[in-house]
Image (tube, rainbow, N blue to C red):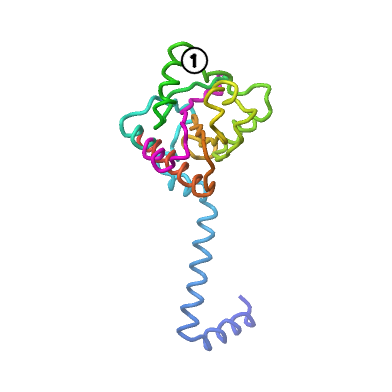
Amino acid sequence: MSEDLKTKIFTFLAHITVKRWLITAGVAISAIGLYSVFENRQKLFEAGLGSVGSYVTDFIVQPPSKAQHEIAYNFLRLHPEIAFMTLIDADPLTNTRKVVHRFTLDPVIERYFAELDRDKPGVGDGPLFNNVEANNSQVIAISNGEFLCSPVKGGLVERIYPEIAKTLIKSCRVPLPPAFRRAGGWFAIHLKSDVDENRFKTDALTMSFLYFEAVK
């Protein structure tokens, strides 16, 4: 170390007060802490997600347990705008999507699906990716952990559930679990009236996370 640099350091230390010492130390500690967070950001992100952080990509969506059933229906009670909600399992390896369960508080819709499943089992199942660009964009968005909504008119719901689609205005999709590139499936939520989308998005993502956590 040069004599000139030593002189400057001693001069600085001679004039520094206790308050300045504390400020300097605080800045240094903060800088080190921020650097550490940045360097380990992925590990911290996954640790913060709990079980979602260690989630396996081949997670298979199963019919709901009693606890999951209650979580889904609490969400429906919170938002009476929902006509029904479909739980879908996605398998990119076989390029298939499968309806696992439907949730509704409407007895008319419940009877409709009971009859449909009896007469035409497998309605709603099909390819995950197809030749429809809008569908493929939605699947990619879901795999990225995104929440998105689209009009019912002209969509898949209108084609496979034409009788019910007449009463619907919008369909929203929530990945399960709601994490980047970790979704094993999603909730398709079909609305009969409009909602505050920001609040609805928060409630839907929370529901999906709680539903996934209830797997334990």
* Residue 168 in view here: yes
Please, what is the three-letter code of the amino acid marked with disc 1? Gly
In the image, the segment drawn in magenta is 73-94
Identify which residue, 181 or 201, lies in the foreground: 201
- Residue that lies at the very extreme toward the bottom in this rendered image: 15
Q: Residue at x 54, y 33 (%)?
A: 168
Identify which residue, 12 or 135, lies in the foreground: 135
Magenta-span inclusion, residue 95: no
Q: Is residue 138 left or right of residue 70?
A: right
How many numbered circles does the render carry? Answer: 1
Identify which residue, 3 or 78, lies in the foreground: 78
* Residue 216 in view here: no
Residue 146 position by quadrant: top right
The answer to whether 48 is drawn above or below residue 27 in the figure is above
> Of helix, strand and loop, which one carries label 1?
loop
Would you call the spot at circle 1 few (<14 residues within 10 Å), some (14-19), or many (20 or more)?
A: few
The answer to whether 131 is drawn above or below residue 39 in the figure is above
Task: Report x, y in % for residue 25.
Answer: 48, 74
The residue indicated by pointer 1 is 122
Q: Is residue 80 left or right of residue 135?
A: left
Magenta-span inclusion, residue 88: yes
Task: Report x, y in % for residue 90.
Answer: 52, 25
Quadrant placement of the C terminus: top left
Task: Report x, y in % for residue 22.
Answer: 46, 78
Quadrant placement of the N terminus: bottom right
